[in-house]
Amino acid sequence: AQKITQTQPGMFVQEKEAVTLDCTYDTSDPSYGLFWYKQPSSGEMIFLIYQGSYDQQNATEGRYSLNFQKARKSANLVISASQLGDSAMYFCASKGEGGATNKLIFGTGTLLAVQP
Amino acid sequence: DAGVIQSPRHEVTEMGQEVTLRCKPISGHDYLFWYRQTMMRGLELLIYFNNNVPIDDSGMPEDRFSAKMPNASFSTLKIQPSEPRDSAVYFCASSDHSKNEQFFGPGTRLTVL
């Protein structure tokens, strides 16, 4: 079974500063993937970044990077140079790889507010 | 390329009525997922298909819910009869077996009065 924990219900950050959103996971799968999605107030779910459990380097996508610490089972999202448009709900998710399962398990989300 | 398309975007119905939600996945994707999002339970997977075949429906809440995928470009999620506790945003997502990310549709906001 997989479980995702996001302990920060809400976060504030000043525009242009960096912010880290926490995510810890628990899985029994030997191989797995970790995802971050953004959900703005308009409601759509936007894929941001993916990290495979066997990837040697931390994933990066533009201003997004994933701080993957396998031993600690954490997959924190770092957003650099925050913009007002980054204000949204952010969800961490995991997916077991291999076997029959292909489903994403989501955390409860962190609401990020970027202040001017 | 068009993304995942869902219809309707909003649905308001009365308790006891049948509700049908529709989804068109991204062309070429072989996985299709139905999720439900509520304040109480967050985002939860209801069912997913691979090559039009249901693989895991363990998240379907009860017999009132059913999902079909008659072909690679269309899926439905039906609730019959609907109840107020079914009020939620229902997302459809699709993915390709060679990629990791799932692409979500805009969602259908269902309100059951």
Image (tube, coloured by chain):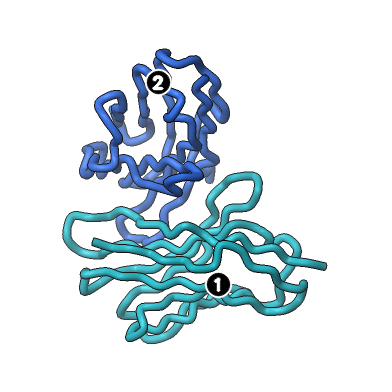
Q: Position of residue A59 (x, y in %)?
A: 47, 78
- Residue in the image at 50% along x and 73% along y: A22
In the rendered view, tell whether residue B30 sits above or below residue A88: above
Q: Quadrant of residue A85?
A: bottom right
Mark number, residue A21 = 1
Q: Quadrant of residue A105?
A: bottom left
- Residue in the image at 35% along x and 78% along y: A73
| Label 2, residues with CA under 10 Å away: few <14, some 14-19, many ≥20 | many
- Residue in the image at 45% along x and 49% along y: B42
Label 2: which residue? B82
- Residue in the image at 21% along x and 70% along y: A28
* Callouts 1 and 2 close, C-beta under 8 Å: no
In the rendered view, tell whether residue B56 sits above or below residue B74: below
In the rendered view, tell whether residue B43 sits above or below residue A91: above
Local secondary structure at mark 2: loop
Q: Which lettered chain is shown in blue?
A: B
Instruction: Give the camera-side residue of B75 and A110.
Output: A110
Q: Position of residue B18 (x, y in %)?
A: 40, 15
What is the chain identity of the residue bearing mark 1? Answer: A
Mark 1 and mark 2, same subunit?
no
Real-space Cα separation, disc 1 to disc 2, in angstroms: 37 Å
Q: What kind of residue is marked 2?
A: Ser
Q: Position of residue B17 (x, y in %)?
A: 42, 13
Q: Which lettered chain is shown in cyan?
A: A
